[in-house]
Image (cartoon, helix red, strand yellow):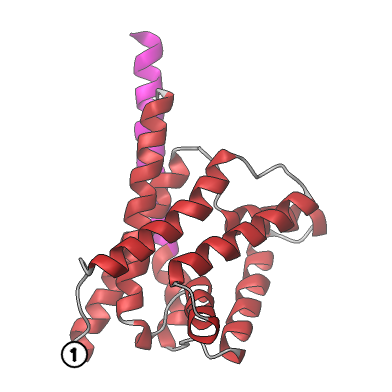
Amino acid sequence: MRYHHRFGMFFFGLIIFSYGIAMAIQVQHLGVSPWDMLNIALRDRFGLTIGTWAVLVGLFLIGCSLFIGRRYINIGTFLNAVLVGAFVDFFLFTGILPSASSLPLDILILLAAIAVMGIGGGMYSAAGIGAGPRDGFMLSLSDKTGFSISHVRIVMESLVVVIGLLIGGPVFLFTFIYPFIQSPIYQRSYLFWKKRMDEDASHAVTG
């Protein structure tokens, strides 16, 4: 796949992923992902916007990854850190989101948000432009410590939940079941777009 096509897929995936985050924040009383919970808690405690905190936390994690090892940090990592926060704020400020109303509808909104995040996440990851700041940090930590990526993720996200709880973040049932819903959707999206990318690259070579 041509490089500008990969960048297009990367940016479009980030937009979809960010829209899913903003959808979930609309019904945050049901619980959001650990990192989004932390950003909401930081906003409530110290001010600034949720998107701004997403950028700041992302840049902090990039700094930690650079200190541990630069293997997983590249231009895509910085773009991810900055653009996701900007897109989330844009969607929240413009109000082009479904609104919370009743519990059954709120649950549907949150389930849709998790699915949208999984689709967008798989899409931008398949573009191969670079790992996100959180994934890059956890991959770097896994390499440094020798622990598996899954163990590092569990420890890191558990720590984030504890920090979020301590400063008043919105923790509820869906905070804990996010990975079980989102991960399979992410995998299917990633494999689908990776296959498309490989097919386009194959056609470009044979053509």
Q: Secondary structure at mark 1?
A: loop
User: Above or below — where is 3 with respect to 61?
Assistant: above
Q: Which one is in front, 198 or 10?
A: 10
Residue type pointed to by label 1? Ser
Q: Quadrant of residue 30?
A: bottom left
The picture places residue 93, in percent across and down from the top left corner, at 29, 68
The picture places residue 147, in percent across and down from the top left corner, at 76, 61
User: Above or below — where is 159 with respect to 195?
Assistant: below
Q: Quadrant of residue 152?
A: bottom right
User: Above or below — where is 7 with respect to 57?
Assistant: above
Q: Which one is in front, 82 or 12?
A: 82
Magenta segment range? 183-207
**Residue 119 seen from this side:** no
Q: Name the residue: 58% across, 63% down.
A: 56
- Magenta portion: prevailing SS class: helix
Q: Name the residue: 44% across, 66% down.
A: 51
User: Mark 1 highlights which residue?
Assistant: 102
The picture places residue 186, in percent across and down from the top left corner, at 41, 56
The picture places residue 5, in percent across and down from the top left corner, at 36, 29
Q: Name the residue: 50% across, 46% down.
A: 79
Per the image, is 198 magenta?
Answer: yes
**Residue 180 seen from this side:** yes
Q: Name the residue: 55% across, 82% down.
A: 46
145 on left or right of 139: right
User: Above or below — where is 69 with respect to 182?
Assistant: above
Q: Quadrant of residue 22?
A: bottom left
Task: State the residue lying farthest toward the top.
Answer: 207
Per the image, is 26 magenta?
Answer: no
The quadrant of the picture occupied by the C terminus is top left
110 on left or right of 186: left
91 on left or right of 68: left
